[in-house]
Image (spheres, rainbow, N blue to C red):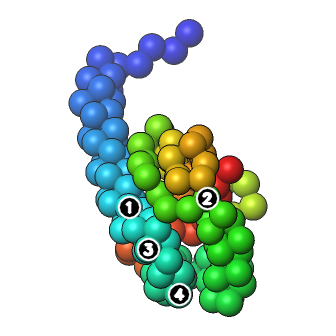
Amino acid sequence: MKRIPCSALILLLTLLPFTSHASEQKQRAAEQEAGKWLALVDGGQYQESWNRAASLFKQQVSAEQWRQAITAARDPFGIMISRQLMNSTYTTALPGAPDGEYVVLQFKTVFKNKQQAIETVTPMLDNGNWRVSGYYVR
């Protein structure tokens, strides 16, 4: 069995908090952008939410397709009453998406006509800025 030199172990242990801190900072930045983006969606500003979305999002869905999809998904629920972040996960790989930096956010959301909804918002680092690349509500 090969032993790790004590100096290497100490270096590894001292770098670990910086790695964790960096991903926490990325998560916070992604959460802030997701909050701004969700405010646009909550306000019915669907065109502006599409404009602020990640380039990957825009490649997959046109502005008109987005307006139709989000109207069908959200309008029946009525206005958003409350939203609470349940979990936030930083990752560099997602199924069906190119490798990159992503944060998967899940919110417990109450709408006027739907008391228990889960919203999943996925910001990605897009040309140096966090932008939403996916949204799903159930």
Dot 4: few (<14), some (14–19), or many (≥20) neighbours within 10 Å?
some
Instruction: Give the residue pinned by disc 3.
Output: 43
| Coordinates of residue 32 in the picture (x, y in percent) | 33, 60
Q: Which residue is mark 4?
A: 47
Q: Which one is earlier in the sequence, the residue at label 2 or at label 4?
A: 4
What whole-number distance in Å separates the C-alpha atoms at marks 2 and 1?
19 Å
Q: Which mark is residue 77?
A: 2
* Of the pair 10 and 84, the residue shown nearer to us: 84
> Which type of secondary structure does the marked residue at label 3 adopt?
loop
Q: Check if mark 1's residue and mark 4's residue have beta carbons within 8 Å.
A: no
- Crowd class of label 1 (few under 14; some 14 to 19; many from 20; radius 10 Å): some
Which residue: 38% across, 61% down? 35
Q: Nearer the viewer, mark 2 or mark 1?
A: 2
Query: What residue appears at the point 53 percent right and 52 percent down from the top-left corner?
Result: 111
Q: Is residue 6 visible?
A: yes
Given this view, does label 1 or label 3 mark the residue nearer the observer? 3
C-beta proximity under 8 Å, tags 2 and 4: no
From what the image shows, is residue 44 above or below residue 93? Answer: below
Q: Which amino acid lies under the numbered mark 2 shown in the image of this protein?
A: Phe
| Residue 122 visible in this rendered orientation of the protein | no
> What residue lies at 46% left-to-right and 68% top-to-bottom?
42
Residue 127 lies in what quarter of the image?
A: bottom left
- Placement of the N terminus among the 4 image quadrants: top right
The secondary element bearing badge 2 is classed as helix
Q: Which residue type carries mark 4?
A: Gln
Between the C-alphas of marks 4 and 3, the distance is 11 Å
